[in-house]
Image (spheres, rainbow, N blue to C red):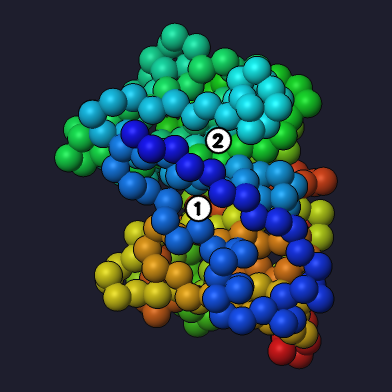
Amino acid sequence: MSFSMVTRYAHSPKDIEHYSTEDLRDEFLMAKLFNPGDILLTYTYNDRMIFGGVTPTTEALEIKLDKALGVDYFLQRRELGFINIGGNGSITIDGQKDTIVTHDGYYIGMGTKSVTFESDDPKNPAKFYVVSTPAHKTYPNKKLPFANALAKPMGDQAHMNKRTIYKYIDASQMDTCQLQMGYTVLEPGSSWNTMPAHTHARRMETYMYFEFSDPDTRVVHFLGEPNASKHIFLEPEQAVVNPSWSIHCGVGTTNYAFIWAMCGENQTYDDMDQVDMHDLK
């Protein structure tokens, strides 16, 4: 088992004006999330979110970040959410084991001392996409089966953005300190995850793109200020950090799915500022 966590810093909008393509990818893209038997994480200074992949095979895996975070154990001052995008598996939370099938999620509250991840079949491992944010209060752990996820149809075919948003960790249905998390699936023939673009200055966000309908599909994620946009091409199972001051939108060469995770000042899902199409440059 190998464990790695890289650090990515916060940036001024002025900083990225001069970034090359490689600079932009180095600072905002997590190119490798899932590797069999490994834990691969990124710590971003944007609201101090930690995100990445846990891919157990023959042995259980546990995130241990006491020294790195200056705490006694990983979730001493943090909350954690995850969605499994791989095969079936299980987790053990402070000694209590629970099954996790594909697309199931979980919320785990501050103060939980041990969370271990396992796969039922090492040849078809679970892929736990995990997101952790700072917390100030303990809320109850909660299993979030995909079958019970709050589904919100959005968009239409005429604008190539017909999609269903599945809310897992959302303030409208459960208590958290600041973490929100969900799964969006675009229908065949749709490619925009949101357009017109928006910003939400009170929350940063990460996007993890996966379930491409064709292995040669690519998603173009747009970020930057509305009048100075940048873009990053993503392959399947890659993630990108989207600062709070940046536009939030992307488009694919075919349909795809993505997991979004947010944290910051406000938990209201619809708290966003629409960008006038004439202001996009």
Residue found at x 31% / y 37%: 37
Residue found at x 43% / y 33%: 145
Label 1, secondary structure: give it: strand
Badge 2 amino acid? Gly
Left or right of 175? Residue 210 is: left
Above or below 80: residue 131: below
Left or right of 103? Residue 200 is: right
Label 2, secondary structure: give it: strand
Q: Residue furthest top?
A: 95
The CA span between labels 1 and 2 is 12 Å
Residue 231 location, x and y as percent?
58, 78
Quadrant of the drawing holding the N terminus: top left
Marks 1 and 2, the one that precedes in the sequence: 2
Residue nearest the viewer, comparing 89 with 19: 19
Badge 1 amino acid? Ile
Residue 96 location, x and y as percent?
43, 11
Q: Residue 259: give its label.
A: 1
Q: Residue at label 2?
A: 81
Residue found at x 45% / y 61%: 31
Residue nearest the viewer, comparing 268 with 39: 39
Residue nearest the viewer, comparing 151 with 124: 124
Residue found at x 55% / y 35%: 81
Q: Quadrant of residue 128?
A: top left
